[in-house]
Image (cartoon, rainbow, N blue to C red):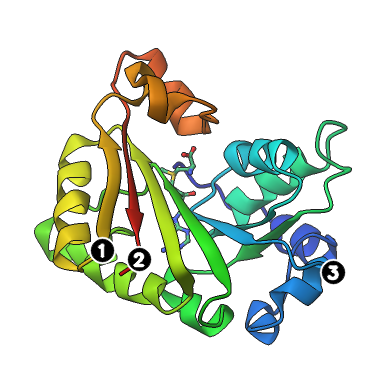
């Protein structure tokens, strides 16, 4: 994603009620943040927020937390959130943080599902540990997911997808389902909510890969 330095980003994010400023202070207490006991789903690397916000409309009985590393990108999601289509949502919170710190922000069993959509591929082998589906990250996710908790991962990058399938197996997770062509897989594509990148790459004719894996 192309980044620009947007000076107003920090101030806007600080002032916005849906942006959680000290997420580590909510560890173990996220249900109180939402004021209900509904399940919590998080999206890591949410980008401009299209997927998260549409999921929140579609599933009002789920609490959604979007995580994005860059404030300039999160600002775009906040601007989308503030439009008439989404500003009534009560089940969305947004966090600006690096996913490597998820264990400091969520307690064991606090999260039911993690969405990873079009995660950065980090193509160099020496950067493999930075991939959000590496065993290093899966170990972090195990520490916050409930028993039976899942990750759902979509990408058009077949190399990253194959790597992710291997990592899931290596980490001892159960590969529940997968496809190399989501949009032509009747069952897995049912109810699919597109992300910004998914829209862009599928319009170019790239098949979309998806896997669903269950925590060991
Ligand atoms: N998920 C969106 C989509 O599918 O349209 C955006 C995909 S974009 C390629 C990847 C996003 O993940 C970027 O916004 C990037 O800043 C964010 N990201 C990458 N690594 C991250 C990390 N370690 N923690 C939080 N966000 C991260």
Displayed quadrant of residue 186? top left
Q: Is residue 123 visible?
A: no
Residue 76 horizontal side relative to residue 69, left or right: right
Looking at the picture, does residue 202 appear above or below residue 173?
above
Query: Do labels 2 and 1 touch, CB within 8 Å?
Result: yes
Above or below: residue 14 compared with residue 4: below
Q: Is disc 1 placed on a helix, strand or loop? A: loop
Relative horizontal placement of residue 85, taking residue 171 as reference (left or right): right
At label 2, counting other C-alpha atoms closer than 10 Å, the crowd grade (few under 14, some 14-19, many 20 or more) is: many
Residue 47, percent from left and from top? 54, 46
Q: Residue at label 3?
A: 35
Q: Judging from the image, what secondary structure is the residue with disc 3 in? A: loop
Mark 1 C-beta closer than 8 Å to ligand 1: no
Closer-to-camera residue (215/194)? 215
Residue 172 in the image: state x and y as whole percent.
Answer: 20, 68
Q: Residue furthest left?
A: 125
The residue under the point 47% across, 71% down is 145
Number of the label disc, if any, that sits on residue 215:
2
Marks 2 and 1, Cα distance to the nearest angstrom? 5 Å
Q: Residues within 10 Å of mark 1 (few under 14, many from 20)?
A: some
| Tags 3 and 2 touching, CB below 8 Å | no
């Amino acid at each position: 994603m192309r980044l620009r330095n947007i000076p107003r980003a920090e101030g806007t994010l600080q002032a916005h009620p849906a942006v959680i400023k000290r997420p580590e202070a909510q560890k173990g207490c996220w249900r109180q943040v939402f004021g209900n006991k509904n399940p919590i789903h998080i999206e890591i690397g949410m980008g401009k927020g299209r997927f998260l916000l549409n999921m929140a409309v579609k599933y009002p009985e789920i609490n959604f937390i979007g995580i994005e590393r860059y404030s300039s990108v999160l600002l775009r999601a906040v601007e989308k959130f503030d439009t008439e289509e989404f500003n009534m949502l009560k089940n969305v919170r947004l966090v600006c943080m690096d996913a490597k710190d998820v264990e400091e922000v969520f307690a064991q069993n606090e999260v039911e599902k993690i969405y990873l959509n079009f995660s950065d591929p980090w193509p160099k082998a020496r950067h493999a540990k930075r991939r959000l589906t590496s065993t290093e990250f899966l170990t972090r996710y195990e520490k916050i997911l409930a028993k039976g908790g899942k990750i759902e991962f979509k990408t058009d990058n077949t190399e990253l997808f194959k790597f992710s399938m291997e990592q899931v197996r290596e980490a001892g997770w159960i590969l529940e389902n997968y496809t190399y062509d989501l949009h032509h897989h009747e069952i897995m594509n049912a109810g699919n909510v597109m992300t910004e990148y998914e829209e862009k790459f599928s319009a170019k004719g790239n098949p979309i890969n998806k896997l669903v894996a269950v925590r060991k």
